[in-house]
Each structure stands twice: as structure tokens, then as C-alpha cells.
Image: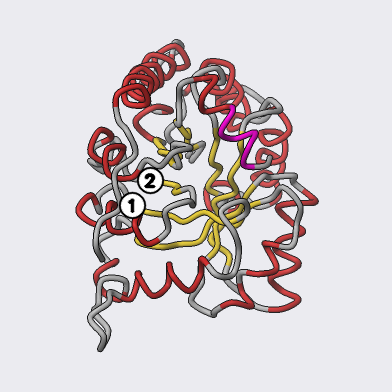
Amino acid sequence: MNRQELVHSIREKQSYLCIGLDTDLHRIPRHLHTHADPVFAFNKAIIDATKDLCVSYKINTAFYECMGIRGWESLQRTIEYIPEGIFTIADAKRGDIGNTATQYAKTFFDTYNFDSVTVAPYMGQDSVTPFLAFTDKWAIMLGLTSNEGSKDFQLQRMEDGEYLYEKVLKTGAGWGTPDNLMFVVGATQTEQIARIRALVPDHFFLVPGVGAQGGDLAEISKRGMNKDCGLLVNVSRGIIYAGNGEDFAADARTAALQYQSEMASLLSSIAPAPAVGV
């Protein structure tokens, strides 16, 4: 999916909601365990209930890899079931170099046909650029994350006064373009989002951490939007586990609709934040 198609989907659905299919076999409703593939049965129901409300699904591969071949089969069935026109993210956080990175890119772009994959830039440019060589595919590079450990490295100041994450963002932006490179920006880093938007004004941000982790959707949107919206806000547990009975999919739809409705209002009422000094 190219940028123009993604922006069109956001405007058409009045949504920038990304739903995380971080499906834990031990958390899905009990009645689904009678299915041959309970994880896919759960995902299928969630997709059927929410596909008109979101513009993206994010599959965290760890929840599938841990089940071995059965998990990869569930992942493949899920990615094949997601309707065309919905942006798909392999949340795999790959970060290796050379031929290895190329093989990872082929795995998610060719074998499984994801639109994007998350990547870790710690090893530098040659760990990211192989993912940028595919037409209409995206690398989503870790920028400033929402976990407690982000302060261990990302929020350390360098000798020139910059945060390390700022160096990573500015350097990484030169490896790709706003048409094939996004950045992960954690929703709990509200105070930093306007600063990050000023550093990379045109790139999309994948924003995890809304919902169960406490990120504020309105504040994120106010500080992070650009002229194309420029945000994919991910909610996982707050939607897919909104209910745990036989009507779990209806409960998931209700939760997703609440986010979509707020996003529609924010899209109409919030102009992109002006650039701020960094």
C-alpha cells in the first residue's frame, strides 16, 4: 500500500485506528478452543467486527512464533483474511544486517505479503535499508518507545544536548522517505510528540500505548498530526479483549467504534500542530 492509498483510507473511514491482533491463546474465549485453529477463529471474528472502523491491523509476531508451526499457520490465515485496502503491519522488530535483513524483508513482504514491518535501528543503516527496497512497502523504525526502559538509552542526552532518540530519528529519516519509512512513537511520550513531529514533519508515526497503557488519544492527535494525519494509533488489548463471552466480537466492535468516533471528531477539529523549536 502506498502513502496516497493510506491517506485516502484515513479520510474515507475518518479513522486512523490500528488494531493490534496480539492474540494470546490463553486469553481468547473458551468456546473458541473447540475450533481447529482457535487463534484464527478469534482473529476472523475481530476482523469481521471491526474492518470498517480501522485502517490497519498490526500482528505482533511473538504471539504466533511462540506456538511454532501452528502459530505461523494462524498468522498466514490471518494475513490472508484481512481485506484488501487495510494496511497491515508485521510487528516483528527485526534488526540485522546485509543478507539476513534482506531475508527478513522477503519473509514479511513476499512470503506473507505484509505492507510493513517494524525494525530496530541499533545496528545502523544497513539493518534498515534492505526493508526500503520493496515497492509500496514500509519499514517502521523504532524511534521513541513507551516502555519504562526507554530512558535507559533513548532519553539519554548526548554531548551536544540532543536526546539519543532525536539523533536516531534525524539520521534514520535520511535512509528512506516519508513514502516508505514510518517511526514508532509511544503514546505515553506525550511531552515529546510535538518535538518529534518538528524533527520529522512529513513521516507517519505508529503510536502504540493508547488504551491499556494509558496514552491520551486527544493529546497525541493534537501534538502529532500533520496535513495527512500522519498517525496510526494502535490499540490492542483495549479492543480485542473488550469482552470474553460468546459476544466478544460485538464488544470489540463497540470499543473500536468509540475510538473511531473520537478520531473522526479529532480529524475535523484539530489542525496540524505548528512546528516547534527543538
> Which residue sits at x=45%, y=47%?
206
Q: Residues within 10 Å of mark 2 (few under 14, many from 20)?
A: many
User: What residue type is disc 1 on?
Assistant: Gly
The secondary structure type at the circle numbered 1 is loop
Q: Nearer the viewer, residue 93 or 264?
A: 264
Q: Residues within 10 Å of mark 1 (few under 14, many from 20)?
A: many
> Which residue sits at x=27%, y=38%?
222
Verify whether residue 133 appears in magenta: no
What residue is shown with label 1?
Answer: 186
Determine whether, in the image, residue 3 is placed left or right of residue 189: right
Instruction: Find out whether the residues at labels 1 and 2 contact each other: C-beta distance under 8 Å.
Output: yes
User: How far apart are the alpha carbons under marks 1 and 2?
Assistant: 5 Å
The answer to whether 177 is drawn above or below residue 20 in the figure is below
The secondary structure type at the circle numbered 2 is loop
Q: Position of residue 43 (x, y in %)?
A: 57, 28
Q: Nearer the viewer, residue 27 or 62?
A: 62
> Which residue sits at x=47%, y=16%?
249
Quadrant of the image containing the N terminus: top right
Q: Nearer the viewer, residue 204 or 111?
A: 204
Q: Position of residue 51 (x, y in %)?
A: 56, 21
What residue is shown with label 2?
Answer: 208
Verify whether residue 5 appears in magenta: yes
Q: Position of residue 49 (x, y in %)?
A: 53, 15
Comes first in the chain, label 1 or label 2: 1
Q: Which residues are magenta?
A: 3-8
> Which residue sits at x=31%, y=71%?
154
Q: Quadrant of residue 223?
A: top left
Farthest-out residue, right: 110
Q: Position of residue 229 (x, y in %)?
A: 44, 36
Q: Nearer the viewer, residue 64 or 139?
A: 139
